Amino acid sequence: MAKAKTDDRGSTLKKIAALFPEARRIRDAGLRRKVLECWAEGCEANGWKPEELKTIPFTLLAGDIDITYLEHVRTVTQMCIACCDIMVKAYGKRVTHKLDRDILIAGSLLADVGKLYEYEKRDGKIVKSKAGDYLRHPFSGVGLAWKHGVPDAAMHIIAGHSKEGEMMTRTAEAIIVNHCDFIDFDIVKYKPKK
């Protein structure tokens, strides 16, 4: 039985890795593995199939938006990488000591992993779960990351990426993720006046 469970986890990890190619940009293989493990466990623990990440809406807070959870996570991560790269190119050594690229990528990939707990499938629809009534995704995401030994600096990003982070002093990486997340959220939900 243990062999089957290990094989299932390996299969899930491969599917998750294929869905999040940005994870390959994390140079630290151990950290990369922890990020993928968080996604795999989040899916498995809550009955999500990895391919369903392509169909889950990225938010339940903005009405009917044709952007998926997977697209949002990947877009925010790509925006964070681009922002980091542009700042390093522009300012060089004046900012490189302030930015940990691996932590930035890990944190941006995991910022919304808690939505796997916050949402559930009910009667063919994606709705807020009972767990989501009690805890928003930054909290459940940090719990999942803690369980997998994700570094504190990346958990700080998960905790601080949304409105919950307004009362904390964010690291440079958390500032980038917070802004990129809200750029994506605000533009996707924006409806131009006619």
Image: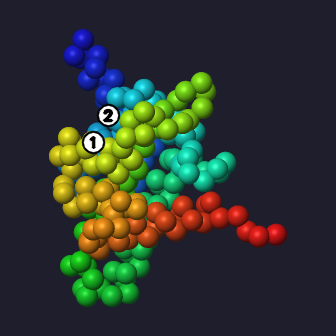
The image shows residue 30 at horizontal and vertical percentages of 20, 48
- Position of the N terminus, as image quadrant, is top left
Q: Residue at x 22, y 16 (%)?
A: 2
Q: Nearer the viewer, residue 129 or 75?
A: 129
Label 1 neighbourhood size at 10 Å, few (<14), some (14-19), many (20+)? many
Q: Which residue lies furthest to the right in this view?
A: 194
Colouring scheme, one of rainbow, by chain, secondary structure, one colour? rainbow
The image shows residue 190 at horizontal and vertical percentages of 65, 64
Q: Residue furthest front?
A: 134
Q: In this view, does 17 lie above or below 138?
A: above
- Position of the C terminus, as image quadrant, is bottom right
Q: Which residue is drawn at 35% across and 67% down?
A: 166
Element assignment for label 2: helix
Which mark is drawn over residue 41?
Answer: 2
The image shows residue 129 at horizontal and vertical percentages of 45, 34
Q: Can residue 16 be seen in this view?
A: no
Check disc 1 and give the amino acid type.
Answer: Leu
Element assignment for label 1: helix
Tag 2 near tag 1, CB within 8 Å: yes
Determine which residue is flagged by label 1.
Answer: 144
Label 2 neighbourhood size at 10 Å, few (<14), some (14-19), many (20+)? some
Q: Residue at x 61, y 61 (%)?
A: 188
Query: Is 97 left, or right, of 115 in this rendering?
Result: left
The image shows residue 52 at horizontal and vertical percentages of 52, 34
Q: Is residue 138 visible?
A: yes
Q: Earlier in the sequence, mark 2 or mark 1?
A: 2
Disc 2 versus disc 1: nearer the observer: 1
Q: Nearer the viewer, residue 135 or 27?
A: 135
Check disc 2 and give the amino acid type.
Answer: Glu
Q: Which residue is drawn at 24% across and 77% down?
A: 98
Query: Is 64 left, or right, of 163 in this rendering?
Result: right
Q: In this view, does 112 lie above or below 96?
A: above
